[in-house]
Amino acid sequence: MNKSTRTISGIALLGVSALLLSGCSSNAGSDSSDSSTLKLWHFESETSAMGIAWDQAIKIFEEETGATVEFEEKSFEQIRSTASQVLNSNEAPDILEYNKGNATAGLLASQGLLTDLDDAVAQHGWDDALAPSLQTTARYDENGIMGSGPWYGVPNYGEFVEVYYNKDMFAANGLEVPTTVAELETVMQAFVDKGITPLAESAAEYPLGQLWYQLALTKADRSFIDDYQLYTGNVDWSGPELSYATETVKDWTNAGYISQDSTGFKAEDAGTAFINGTYPIFYSGSWWHNRFTTEVTGFDWGTFLFPEAQFSPGSAGNMWVVPEKAANKDLAYQFIDITMRPEIQALIGNNGGIPVAANAADITDPKSQELIGNFNTLTDQDGIAFYPDWPTATFYDELNAGLQELINGTKSSSEVLEQLGGQYQSGVDDIVG
C-alpha cells in the first residue's frame, strides 16, 4: 500500500483524536472544501485484494476531491472490541470498515451509532449494483436484525468459506480432492497415518467455529438457517444439525485430524502454518486467498467447496459504515462510491477478492476466476448461510470458549451443546424479547 499519498497515524488512537479531528468540519456531512480531511479506518492488510483496491480508491478520492485521507489501519479485534465506545464519542472516524451481522453492525445500528444511508444509497444507485442476497447484511431494523429496515452499510465485495489444500502434499500421498465427507475423512486419516495433522485450526478465534457451523450446514436446510440467523423459529440445540457438528469436531479431535494445541492458536497462527506447509488443509475464508497467492512459495495450492454441502458460511463482505457522529459524511459517501467503480472492483477481483459490481471481462487472473466461480456456485444455489457468531453480540467469544472446552475434553459434546444453547438463547432474548 502506497502510504505516501496520505497521513497514517502511528500514535495511539486516544492520544491523537483531537489532532485528527482538527482538520474536519464541525458540521457533519457538510464540508467538501480542499482543506477537508476524511478520517478512515479499515483492517485489511496492504497486500490483500481490498487493501490494494482501497489504496487506489484513496488516490482517486484525493485527486478528485482535493481532500486528504487520514488513514489508520486497525486490527479486526481492535475495531470489534472498541467500536461501541469509540463511535459513541467525538473520536469516531468519518468512515470505517465494519463487520456485518446482527451482533455487530446490527447492534451498533440499534444503538443509534451508525448513519441511516437510505438517501445516499438512492442517490448513488448502490442498491442497483448489489444483488438482493448481498443486501441482506446491509439493512437492519430497529432491533438490529438484518434483512429489513434502513441501509446502515455498503459492502463492495463478497466473501465465503472454502477448503484450501496443499496440492503437492495431496499428490505425494496419492490423494484426490474429496467429494463426500466420508472421502474427506479418508484423506485426513491418510495424513494422520503418516504422522501429519491434516487440519490447520484455530480455536482461539474464528476458524474452528466456522468449521463447526459448516458441519451443521451439511445437515441443514434454509429453514434452519433462518431460524438460527433471523430468529424465525426456535433452534433445537439437540437436533441433528448442531449435534452432528459438535460430535464431529470432538471425533475429529480424537482421531488426530484437529490438534488439541489449536485451543491456543489464533487465526493468524493457523493461516501461517498452512503457508509454511505444516498442514495440508485449511478451512477458512476467501479473505486468505490473495495472501496465499502472494506468500505461498514452497508448494502449489488449490481450493474446493466443502463436500456434500449446499450451504457454506459467507455473505456480502464487511461494509463501509458511517458513524452517526462522523464529521464529514458527504466525503464518506464520495469515497464509498469510488470503491464501487468498475476499475476498483476489477482490482478486487484480480487480486484474490470477490467483487460485487465488476465487469466479468475485467477479471483475468485464473486463480481469481476460480475463487469467484466458487462464490457464484454458492449464490446460484442460494447457498450463502452467514456466520455462526452473528445472532448475538456475545456469541463469538462464547462459541470459541465452548469449542475450546470441547477440544480440551473438559466438557462433553452434550455439555457444550447445552452451554452454547443457553448462551445463544439468552442473547437472542436480549434482542427480540
Image: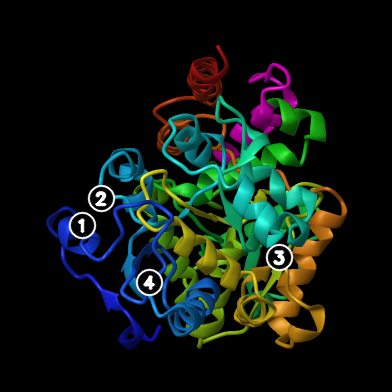
Residue shown at 81%/35% (left/top)?
A: 222
Let me know if residue 229 is in the magenta part.
yes
Q: Is residue 410 above or below residue 400?
A: above
Residue shown at 36%/51% (left/top)?
A: 79
Determine the secondary structure under disc 4. Answer: loop
Q: Are marks 4 and 2 in contact (CB under 8 Å)?
A: no
The residue under label 2 is which amino acid type?
Glu
Boundaries of the magenta span: 228-251
Q: Is residue 289 above or below residue 224?
A: below
Image depth: mark 4 or mark 2 in front: 4
Task: Give the mark nearest the N terminus, 4 or 2.
Answer: 4
Tell which of 168 and 93 is nearer to you: 93
The residue under label 3 is which amino acid type?
Val
Tell which of 223 and 69 is nearer to you: 69
Residue at numbered disc 2: 91
Q: Report how far apart the C-alphas of labels 4 and 2 lie in the structure.
A: 21 Å
- Say which mark, if any, is on residue 356: 3
Q: Are marks 1 and 2 in contact (CB under 8 Å)?
A: yes
Let me know if residue 186 is in the magenta part.
no
Determine the secondary structure under disc 1. Answer: helix
The residue under label 4 is which amino acid type?
Ser
Image depth: mark 1 or mark 4 in front: 4
Tell which of 8 and 428 is nearer to you: 8
- Say which mark, if any, is on residue 33: 4
Residue at numbered disc 1: 13
Local packing at callout 4 (Cα closer than 10 Å; few below 14, some 14-19, many 20+) is few
397 horizontally vs 167: left or right: left
188 horizontally vs 380: left or right: left
Image depth: mark 3 or mark 4 in front: 4
Task: Give the mark nearest the N terminus, 3 or 4.
Answer: 4
137 horizontally vs 61: left or right: right
Task: Give the mark nearest the N terminus, 3 or 2.
Answer: 2
